[in-house]
C-alpha cells in the first residue's frame, strides 16, 4: 500500500493530468482502487483535483505547502548539478536560493547519495556569463508550464531593432545558448517556427487554450536554435574559406563560433559569420586566424580594415 501510493504520487508529479484508466494500467490495479488511493493522498493534504471530461481524470495542483518530490538517484544528481549551474547563471536573484536548495537536498538524500552531492556542492562552481541580461525565474516558470501543458501563450515582444508587437504562439521548448534564454515556438500568425529572447518578452499571458503539438523540422530543439542563429542575417556578415576540414576547424577552436561551418572539399571549409557588432566579427576572424591555417576573407570594407589594423598592431613591436 505505501509503495503504491508513492508510485501514484510520482506519476501525478510527472504529468499535468492523468485519466483514471491510464493510472490504473500503470499501477496494475483497478480504476476503483485508483479512486481510493486518490482519496488517501487527499487525506494526507495532497491537492489532487478531479477533472471533467469523457473519461475524467486527476491533476496534482498547487496547494498551501510544497509537497515532497520523489526523485530517483539519477534525477537527484541532475537536480544538484542544475542548482550549482544556476548559481552562476543568468537567472536573476537565484544564486542564494540555489545554494539553500542544494543544502536541503543534501540533508534529505539517502545515505548512498549524500557524500556524492556533498562533494559536488563543496567543490563545484559555475562561472557567470558576462554581459548577459538577467531573466526573472517567474517568467521562466510560466514559459516552462506553457511548453509542458501545450497551451497557447500571448506576450509583448521587443525585437533586436527595438520594434515591439503582440505575439500569440505555440510554445515548444526553452533553450539556453551562451547564457541567453530563448523560447522556441511556432507562430501561427507568421506560419513558421520562431525563437524569442526571454529577456525581451513582457506581459506574458497564458491563455489556458490547448494546441496540438507540431513536430520540429529537426529532432533537437537546441540544435535547431543554434542553426537558426548561424543562418540569421545581421548588420555585418563575413565569409571565410579556411584550409582545414570543417570537423578539424570545430575541434581546434577554443570557443564556440556562432556561425555556419561547412566543408568545401576534402581539406577546406567555409565559415559564415553574422552579427550586429563589427568588433565581434573581428574577434571571430582573429580566433580562426590564430589556428595558423590559410584563409581568405570576404567581408565588408569596415571588417577588412579592422582585421588589417589588428594584424598591424600584433606585428608592431611595443615601444
Image: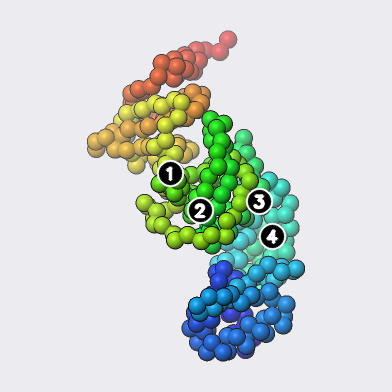
In the image as oriented, which residue stretches furthest toward the top?
319
Residues under labels 3 and 2: Cα distance? 17 Å
SS class, disc 1: loop
* Quarter where residue 289 is shown: top left
Nearest-to-viewer mark from 1 and 2 = 1
First in residue order: circle 3 vs circle 4: 4
Q: Is residue 265 left or right of residue 224?
A: left
Residue 11 locus on image (x, y percent): 56, 75
Q: Give the residue at x 71% y 69%.
A: 63
Quick one: 219 or 315, which is closer to the camera?
A: 219
Which residue is depicted at the point 50% across and 82% down?
A: 21
Q: Nearer the viewer, residue 247 or 258?
A: 258
Query: Which dot marks residue 180?
Result: none
Q: Which residue is mark 1?
A: 190
Instruction: Name the secondary structure under disc 3.
Output: helix
Circle 2 residue? 171
Mark 3 or mark 2: name the one nearer the start of the chain: 3
Q: Which residue is mark 3?
A: 137
Q: Contact (CB < 8 A) between labels 1 and 2?
A: no
Nearer to us: label 1 or label 3? 1
Q: Residue furthest left?
A: 265
Q: Secondary structure at mark 2?
A: strand
| 27, above or below 246, in the image | below
Q: Is residue 14 visible?
A: no
Point out the image quarter for the C terminus.
Answer: top right
Alpha carbons under labels 1 and 2: distance apart: 14 Å
Q: x, y percentage for residue 314?
A: 49, 18
Number of numbered discs on residues? 4
Which residue: 58% across, 85% down?
Answer: 34
Q: Nearer the viewer, mark 4 or mark 2?
A: 2
In the rendered view, tell whether residue 153 sits above or below residue 12: above
Amino acid at each position: 500500500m505505501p509503495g503504491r501510493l508513492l508510485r501514484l504520487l510520482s506519476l501525478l508529479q510527472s504529468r499535468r493530468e492523468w485519466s483514471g484508466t491510464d493510472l490504473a494500467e500503470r499501477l496494475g490495479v483497478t480504476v476503483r482502487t485508483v479512486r481510493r488511493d486518490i482519496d488517501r493522498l487527499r487525506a494526507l493534504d495532497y491537492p489532487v483535483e478531479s477533472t471533467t471530461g469523457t473519461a475524467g481524470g486527476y491533476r496534482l495542483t498547487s496547494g498551501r505547502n510544497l509537497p515532497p518530490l520523489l526523485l530517483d538517484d539519477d534525477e537527484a544528481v541532475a537536480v544538484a548539478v542544475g542548482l550549482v549551474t544556476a548559481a552562476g547563471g543568468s537567472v536573476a536573484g537565484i544564486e542564494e536560493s540555489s545554494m539553500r536548495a542544494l543544502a536541503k537536498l543534501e540533508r534529505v538524500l539517502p545515505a548512498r547519495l549524500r557524500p556524492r552531492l556533498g562533494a559536488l556542492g563543496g567543490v563545484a562552481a559555475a562561472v557567470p556569463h558576462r554581459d548577459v541580461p538577467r531573466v526573472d525565474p517567474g517568467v521562466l516558470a510560466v514559459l516552462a508550464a506553457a511548453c509542458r501543458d501545450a497551451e497557447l501563450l500571448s506576450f509583448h515582444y521587443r525585437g533586436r531593432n527595438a520594434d515591439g508587437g503582440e505575439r500569440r504562439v505555440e510554445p515548444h521548448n526553452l533553450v539556453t545558448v551562451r547564457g541567453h534564454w530563448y523560447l522556441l515556438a511556432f507562430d501561427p500568425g507568421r506560419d513558421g517556427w520562431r525563437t524569442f529572447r526571454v529577456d525581451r518578452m513582457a506581459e506574458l499571458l497564458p491563455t489556458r487554450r490547448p494546441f496540438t503539438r507540431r513536430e520540429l523540422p529537426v529532432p533537437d530543439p537546441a540544435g535547431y536554435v543554434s542553426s537558426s542563429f548561424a543562418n540569421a542575417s545581421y548588420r555585418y556578415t563575413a565569409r571565410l574559406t579556411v584550409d582545414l576540414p570543417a570537423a578539424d576547424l570545430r575541434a581546434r577552436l577554443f570557443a564556440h563560433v556562432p556561425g555556419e561551418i561547412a566543408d568545401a572539399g576534402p581539406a577546406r571549409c567555409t565559415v559564415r559569420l553574422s552579427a550586429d557588432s563589427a568588433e565581434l566579427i573581428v574577434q571571430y576572424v582573429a580566433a580562426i586566424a590564430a589556428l595558423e591555417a590559410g584563409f581568405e576573407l570576404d567581408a565588408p570594407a569596415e571588417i577588412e580594415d579592422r582585421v588589417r589594423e589588428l594584424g598591424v598592431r600584433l606585428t608592431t613591436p611595443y615601444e
